[in-house]
Image (spheres, rainbow, N blue to C red):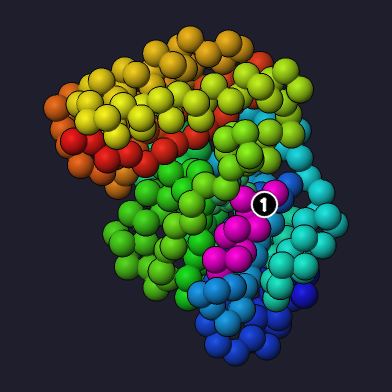
């Protein structure tokens, strides 16, 4: 596996790869969720290329950019064992030789839900995703359903800008307890890990209501009540949305939908979501 920290090294390494490339972008602190993306990428493409970069542009003031877990050596061992051919792990100076003047405007989907709490987040995400697509020129790029709003925005960007890459979604990898795997789970204490179960439990309560044939409003309220009653959890939002646009479902709407939530457990902000079919 080639580990590249400069554009020159990256270009040299990519020049040696023949065939299709599947890209997995990460911020490191890898877990099985990331590795499920690598597995999907290696099934679909001749070579898997990965990036490890904690992108300052997608963190707001007071967020965890400085304390975000970083362990490049361990991450590279995991990626190599998973069969990745090339890793790009640039410094901030390599990624952003200057503060970018041209910025991507992610549009209305970036100011709701995650974007309401983190107003500059998605502009920062799309900036780095667009750059890494240009630098690594993948045929396919794999993103986790865990970050469903990010996935919907990346698909929208690729469609609206005719970017020559195919976006593939990978289901959420969960621990046995049901908690969605996340690098930020490393922040949780023992008791907080139990509290964190409140998120997936609330989503499952909503999904259960959907399976029982309840209306959209009942599905949403069932999940909300479950989360509101969960110990040690402070709800940021919980809603039932259109998976492609993140527009909230009308109370009597039917069809495929996504229950999305974010909540604080102690000082850690966690997100989760679950696909449901209403009606
Ligand atoms: P991150 O390192 O958190 O930026 O995540 C990198 C990629 O891994 C993103 O596409 C995430 O959606 C994906 N990812 C993170 N956690 C999970 C998970 N539990 N299941 C599936 N994909 C995940």
How many circles with numbers are drawn on the protein? 1
> Residue drawn at (44%, 16%), measured in percent from left and top?
226
Q: Is residue 199 visible?
A: yes
Say whether residue 170 is left or right of residue 14. Answer: left
Residue 140 part of the magenta-drawn span:
no
Please say whether residue 123 is visible from this viewpoint: no
Q: Main secondary structure of the magenta part?
A: helix
Residue 34, percent from left and from top: 63, 54
Query: Where residue 210 appears, x then y in whole percent?
Result: 28, 31
User: Residue 43 vs residue 76: left or right?
Assistant: left
User: Could you say which is closer to the camera, residue 59 or residue 226?
Assistant: 226
The residue under label 1 is: 32
Was residue 37 drawn as part of the magenta stretch in this picture?
yes
User: With 13 as the anchor, is 221 left or right in this view?
Assistant: left
Q: Quadrant of residue 149?
A: top left
Mark 1 lies on a secondary structure that is helix
Percent x, y of residue 33 = 62, 50
User: Which residue lies most toward the right here?
Assistant: 73
Q: Position of residue 81 (x, y in %)?
A: 77, 67
Is the distance from the Cβ of mark 1 to the nearest ligand 1 atom less than 8 Å?
Answer: yes
Tell me the magenta residue range: 31-41
Is the C terminus in the top left, top right, bottom left or bottom right quadrant?
A: top left
Graded by Cα atoms within 10 Å as few (under 14), some (14 to 19) or many (20 or more), the crowding at tag 1 reads some
């Amino acid at each position: 596996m080639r580990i590249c920290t400069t554009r020159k090294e990256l270009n040299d390494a990519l020049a040696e790869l023949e065939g299709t490339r599947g890209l997995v972008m990460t911020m490191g602190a890898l877990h099985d969720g990331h590795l499920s993306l690598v597995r999907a990428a290696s099934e679909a493409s001749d070579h898997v290329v990965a990036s490890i970069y904690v992108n300052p542009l997608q963190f707001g003031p007071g967020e965890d950019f400085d304390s975000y877990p970083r362990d490049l050596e361990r991450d590279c061992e995991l990626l190599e064992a998973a069969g990745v051919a090339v890793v790009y792990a640039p410094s901030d100076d390599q990624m952003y030789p200057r503060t970018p003047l041209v910025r991507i405007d992610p549009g209305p989907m970036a100011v709701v839900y995650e974007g309401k709490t983190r107003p500059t987040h998605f502009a920062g995400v799309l900036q780095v995703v667009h750059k890494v697509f240009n630098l690594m020129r993948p045929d396919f790029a794999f993103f986790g359903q865990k970050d469903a709003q990010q996935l919907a925005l990346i698909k929208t960007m690729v469609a609206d800008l005719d970017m020559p890459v195919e976006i593939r979604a990978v289901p959420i990898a969960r621990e046995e307890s049901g908690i969605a795997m996340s690098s930020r789970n490393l922040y949780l204490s023992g008791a907080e890990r139990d509290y964190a179960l409140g998120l997936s439990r609330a989503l499952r309560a909503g999904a259960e209501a959907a399976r029982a044939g309840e209306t959209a409003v009942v599905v949403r309220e069932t999940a909300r009540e479950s989360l509101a009653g969960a110990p040690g959890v402070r709800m940021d939002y919980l809603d039932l949305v259109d998976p492609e646009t993140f527009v909230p479902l009308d109370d009597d709407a039917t069809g495929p939908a996504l229950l999305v939530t974010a909540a604080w457990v102690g000082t850690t902000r966690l997100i989760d979501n679950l696909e449901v079919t209403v009606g």
